[in-house]
Amino acid sequence: MPLRPVDRDVLEDISQDISQSNYGFLYVDRVRDDLKDQYQSREKGRLKAPKLSTSDVKESLRDLAEDENYSLERIRSGVFYWDPFGSGTRTGITERLKGVFRDQMVVTTEDLRKAFDLAHEDADFFAKQLRRQNLVMRIAAGSRDYYSVGSRLKEETGEDDLNGKLKRRATHGKLSHGQLEEAISVAATSDVIGYLQGEGLIIDMDGEYLVRSALDEFAEKLAADLGDDVTRAFDDAGNVMPTGEYDSLVESEIEVRSNALAHVRSSGADLSRRDVIEAVQAEYADGNDPHVEVLDARSLAVSVEPFDSMIEARAEELTRPLLQDLTAATADTLKEELREQVEDLHLTTSDAGNAYARTQVRERGEELIDERF
């Protein structure tokens, strides 16, 4: 130690500045000359040492780390750490992590070490700090540690987490085995795939994978593929059918074209056959072809445009002769005649559907009559 004591406050400020520029790490062998130069140029107490030797630097930093009044932590000989998270000065850490994960879904501890230019011995320590801050998420796969985007990194940078990255890479909600291997791109690919399956993020469908977070995209493509057959089934049923029949229709059509339902059942994922069926039905409810509206109160599913056209045509057909001679007629007498004719209509293949269709024809016919009076 120098004859006069080191100005610890000055040394603390310098150490913090240097460590923050290196993500919290201070490697004495890398920065000792810079540290000595900065100390010598700073204003210090009159009774403090004016400059430091290399041995002074090492001993003084060690003393700082042992003093509970200072925040410097000694990790190992010659290496110190100033917590950038505790001090609120995470200089460049989130930005660097975003760069690491920009094109990679999963990274190794070694990838993190290289990105932050750390010594091999410090990689696990730093990865642990990142995990504590939810900047990265550890993937327990095989004998090595793997990481993906943590919740805090997603929130602060908008970088996709594992779900988002899988969804972005999927085509129509699915990934082939080769695409998934390419996306993971680490040594223990099979272990990571096993982790993704175990977490319910993907579902193995014999050589390709359904991405749980991309179920809507999968359902959109499936709904388009089924559309013609679903339309024909509604045409045959009179454009309206009980919801149970509609559920069975969609389920059977999915099973003809995809093995998704069988694999969902056996996957153990937080996804049921019903979820897939409802996702497809949601596409039709949103106006895809066919546009199907489910009337929960009546337990009926209606193919909207054809049903509306059918109702309009039947209402016009029944009211046209009634409205030809209005000299001795009243609206009420015509409506009574309309009701009698509507009771004889058989428009759909189900009793519930037929009752609903009759009601719609009667109401529309009465509107047409009212328009003439």
Image (cartoon, rainbow, N blue to C red):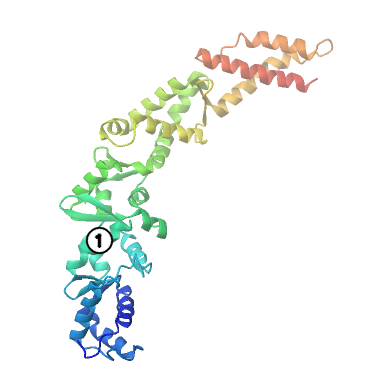
Farthest-out residue, right: 327
Decide which of 144, 27 is in the foreground and name it. Answer: 27
Q: Is residue 239 left or right of residue 256?
A: right
- Residue identifier under label 1: 127
Secondary element at image label 1: helix
- Residue 316 visible? The answer is no
Q: Foreground residue, 291 or 184?
A: 184
Mark 1 residue crowding within 10 angstroms, few (<14) / some (14–19) / many (20+)? many
In the image, residue 306 above or below residue 148: above
Classify 124 as above or below 328. Answer: below
Q: Tell me which residue sits at (55%, 28%) in the image.
A: 304
Point out the image quarter for the C terminus: top right
In the rendered picture of this protein, how many numbered marks are placed on residues?
Answer: 1
For the residue pair 113 and 185, the one nearer the viewer reads as: 113
Task: Tell me where residue 344 appears, x and y as whole percent.
Answer: 61, 8
Image quarter hosting the N terminus: bottom left
Percent position of residue 361, x then y: 64, 18
The x, y position of residue 29, in whole percent, is 20, 80
Q: Position of residue 56 (x, y in %)?
A: 20, 85
Q: Amino acid at mark 1?
A: Ala
**Residue 131 is drawn in which quadrant?**
bottom left
Q: Residue furthest front?
A: 47
Left or right side of 288 for 33: left
